[in-house]
Image (cartoon, grey):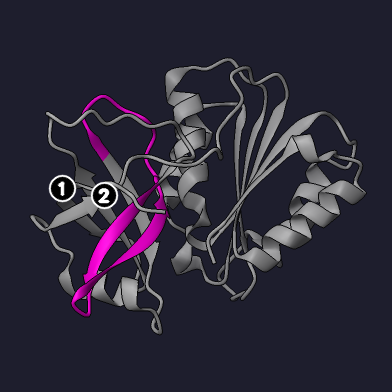
Amino acid sequence: MAYKYDEAEIIKVIEESDTIKRFIIKVPAEIPFTFKAGQFIMLNLPIDSKYTNRSYSIASPPNNDNTFELCIVINPNGLGTNFMWSNYKEGTKVNISKVLGKFQLPEVIDRDICFIGTGTGIAPLRSMAVDILKQGRPCKNIYMVFGNRWEKDISYRSEFESLEKEFSNFKFIPVLSRDNEQWTGRKGYVHAIYEEIFSDNRPAYFYICGWSDMLKEARHRLENMGYDKNAIRFESYD
């Protein structure tokens, strides 16, 4: 599919970890730019004398200032992220598509929500959770189950911990698969966590984003728990 691209500007780069960067991008005021939590954009990257498309979920909640954030992990063997790491700095101009995607929240949130993410699959889930909480949207309990290998990989950790203190209905549950002696949180994989929380099979929406193997297993396990496909929304990034 051919996309129309507009020029935007990187206004800030945050090194979240040794492998993850957060890019804050501003769209010119004269270009209409709105999005819904969970959507994504395409970047048009000038690689090897040609342009290459890459899609990335928007990590920030919707706002009115024509900015958005991408949270990206480097792929040592990939063309796209290696180009970004070498060339994307504050002030760099980037070509972005219109906003795309149907990975979105329901208009009415009438049951618990469980966000299940791994790695930078946290991006659209962070957008959704912050949007719900900061906009004061009516909702029930919100669970953020976030799986990573190592403690250093937990993106947005301080923000999620602050939200947990501020909102009594928000629960942040980081899970590490490569445990270390200092880590006192949950260990293993995300699956045991949501199976434990929803062992009573109460009504819930499940939003899943991350590595494709995790996504497939989560869908299978949730369906085995009795949740139908309409309760399970997902987005893969590999």
The outermost residue toward the left is 91
The local secondary structure at tag 2 comes to: strand
Identify whether 107 is placed above or below 185.
Answer: above
**Residue 200 position by quadrant:** top right
Give the residue drawn at x 45%, y 29%: 131
Q: Does the magenta stretch include residue 59?
A: yes
Q: Which mark is residue 7?
A: 1
Give the residue drawn at x 37%, y 62%: 54
The C terminus sits in image quarter: bottom right
- Give the amino acid type for the residue marked by disc 1 in the picture: Glu
Give the residue drawn at x 85%, y 38%: 228
**Residue 203 position by quadrant:** top right
Q: Report the Cα–Cα distance between label 1 and label 2.
A: 6 Å
- Give the amino acid type for the residue marked by disc 2 in the picture: Ile
Magenta-highlighted residues: 41-67
Identify whether 154 is placed above or below 30.
Answer: below
Per the image, the residue denoted by label 2 is 96
Is 205 left or right of 59, judged from the image as shown? Answer: right
Q: Does the magenta stretch include residue 101?
A: no
**Residue 105 position by quadrant:** top right
Give the residue drawn at x 13%, y 36%: 28
Q: Position of residue 143 (x, y in %)?
A: 64, 39
Work out whether mark 1 precedes mark 2 in sequence or the reverse, and give the earlier one.
1
Pointer 2: residues within 10 angstroms few (<14), some, or many (20+)? many
Q: Position of residue 155 (x, y in %)?
A: 43, 56
Using the image as rendered, state which of residue 140 and residue 65 is in the foreground. Answer: 65
The local secondary structure at tag 1 comes to: strand
Q: Do the residues labelled 1 and 2 touch (CB within 8 Å)?
A: yes
